[in-house]
Amino acid sequence: EVFLAHRQVRDCSVRLMRPDEGERLKAFVVLNEGVPAGDEVRQSIRRHLVGRLSRVEQPGSIIFGPELPKNEMGKLADWSVGRRTTGQ
């Protein structure tokens, strides 16, 4: 809900990192149409999270993509923090 309150975020999924990725949360973010993915919007989202989420609730990785990752059955799927659609 905190991510979705950001004016440039259309959708988001947050999960725990896999053990090989680290010990934090990771976020996969779908931006509103016309919003370019990159460091500027990533920093804007991080500033938005400060004060709304505790340090441990803030993801260590934010990755952007055109739609949330889903499996063959259409259910939300995991993603790798190594996957760099447009960066972390």
Image: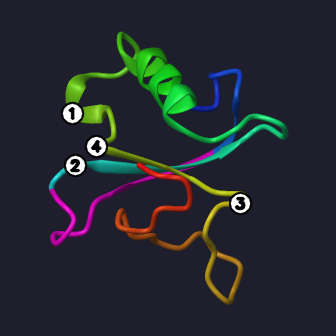
Q: Is residue 1 visible?
A: no
Closer to viewer: mark 2 or mark 4: 4
Residue found 71% across the figure and 21% down from its top: 7
Residue found 47% across the figure and 62% down from its top: 84
Dot 3 or dot 2: first in sequence order is 2
On screen, residue 34 versus residue 41, left or right, reads: right
Residue that label 1 marks: 56
The residue lying toward the viewer, choosing from 70 and 42, is: 42
Dot 1 or dot 2: first in sequence order is 2
Q: Amino acid at mark 3?
A: Glu
The location of residue 36, given as percent across then percent down, is: 70, 38
The location of residue 55, given as percent across then percent down, is: 22, 25
Outermost residue, right side? 33
Residue that label 4 marks: 60
Closer to viewer: mark 4 or mark 1: 4
Residue segment shown in magenta: 12-22
Q: Is residue 16 magenta?
A: yes
Mark pair 1, 3: CA separation: 25 Å
Q: Amino acid at mark 1?
A: Val
Can you say which quadrant of the picture contains the N terminus?
Answer: top right
